[in-house]
Image (cartoon, rainbow, N blue to C red):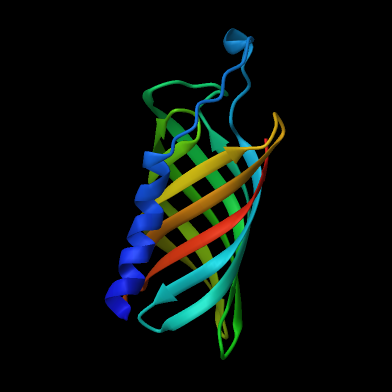
Amino acid sequence: MIKLFFIVLLSINILPFCIAQSVSDENDSQSEHLSRFRFVSGYSISSEGSSPILNFNFHYSGFKRNSQNFQVKFAFEPGLIFLFSDTRSYFLPYLRLSPEFGFNNNIFLNVNAGAAIYSYGEGQSIVPFYGFSVNYLFHLNNAFALELESGINSTLLTYRPFGYFYIAIGVAFI
């Protein structure tokens, strides 16, 4: 059963590469960046269990609308993650930076590094992390898109490393 679950998750990561859509516009030279405000909801799976997540962020993308073919640009993302577990909920402000690999204006792969602020009983701590994510934008119009995201993140330079896989779907306001 677990093997089937991981095969399905891997398929979700690979499927967008197979069904890439191309968006064309007459004003290619005056295209706007694909930077977007995002609200995504999903599920995270780690060695400590699984839990639902909500994520609000602004994803700055160096890509412009109607980017064609393979390109590499810079991405910057400040955001807030709400992670719900059985024992308590976590509110994690974070910042991540990454090179972003783009395929046909709607598929993006990010290899990222960042930091999150973790609050605990005695205070707060900045926790560095690294990971990667795959995003698929399904453009509904020039200002709105559905976004599928999946990825893996892990803490960096911590006493007890923590890693998790997540899959989410949400809306993006471009």
Q: State the residue lying farthest toward the left.
A: 3
- Residue 119 location, quadrant: bottom right
Query: Can residue 170 be spotted in the picture?
Result: yes
The mark tally for this picture is 0
Q: Residue at x 47, y 46 (%)?
A: 135
Q: Residue at x 37, y 40 (%)?
A: 18
Residue 158 lies, with reference to residue 172, above or below; the image says: below
Quadrant of the drawing holding the C terminus: top right
Seen from the viewer's position, the closer of residues 4 and 125 is 4
Residue at 32 percent of width and 69 percent of height:
6
Closer to the camera in the image, 115 or 143 = 143
Residue 36 point in image, percent of width and height: 64, 39
Foreground residue, 165 or 162?
165
Residue placed most toward the observer, 120 or 25: 25
Q: Is residue 139 above or below residue 89?
A: above
87 relative to 165, above or below = below
Query: In this view of the protein, can residue 156 be seen by the observer?
Result: no
At a point 49% along the width and 44% down the height, the residue shown is 136
Horizontal side of 154 relative to 36 (left or right) equals left
Q: Position of residue 48 (x, y in %)?
A: 40, 84
Point out the image quarter for the N terminus: bottom left
Q: Pinpoint residue 71: horizontal percent, then vertical percent.
A: 38, 25
